[in-house]
Amino acid sequence: MADRCSADELVRFSFEALEAWAREHGWARGPDQTPHEFAHEIGTRVDSLSQDVRRLADLYCRVAYAPDTLPPRSVAPLKQLWQELRHREPQWGHVFNSQ
């Protein structure tokens, strides 16, 4: 999937997937919670995701609020997040192939 999407699409998809994953674990994003506040909350609950979800929140804010699109190389850090999610939830590993 990562090869078929633009960087912006992959970031949006990844953030929405993180929100879905968090909801499944009882940690739904609050309606007034910013992406960074949400990432901080997830990071305090799952330490191994802390750095990766903060990077995702940074990328998501750039996609949502900046006028330019992201360069393809900017999504490379998302691979680590998806690998961690795949480790925790095997059904979530369909975005990046394991390498």
Image: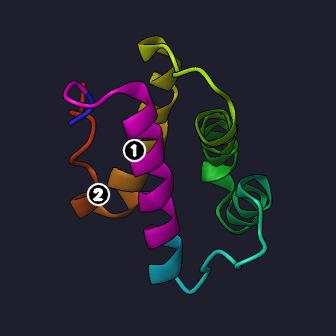
Residue 93 appears in the picture as rendered: yes
Which scheme is used to colour this image of the protein? rainbow
**Residue 24 occupies quadrant:** bottom left
Q: Is residue 91 above or below residue 5?
A: below
Q: Which residues are magenta?
A: 3-21
Splitting the image into 4 quarters, where does residue 20 fall?
bottom left
Against 25, residue 50 (above or below) is: above
Label 1 vs 2, first from the N-terminus: 1
Determine which residue is flagged by label 1: 82
User: Foreground residue, 16 or 55?
Assistant: 16
- Which of the labelled discs sits on residue 90, or is there none? none
Q: In this view of the protein, which residue sits in the foreground, 14 or 82?
A: 14
Q: Residues within 10 Å of mark 1 (few under 14, many from 20)?
A: many
In percent of width and height, residue 64 lies at 62, 42
* Circle 2: residue type: Trp
Identify the residue shown where x is 21% and y is 33%: 97
The residue identified by callout 2 is: 92
User: The residue under label 1 is which amino acid type?
Assistant: Trp
Percent of width and height locating residue 6 = 34, 27
Residue 20 falls inside the magenta stretch: yes
Q: Are marks 1 and 2 in contact (CB under 8 Å)?
A: yes
In the rendered view, does 59 fall on the left or right side of 35? Answer: left
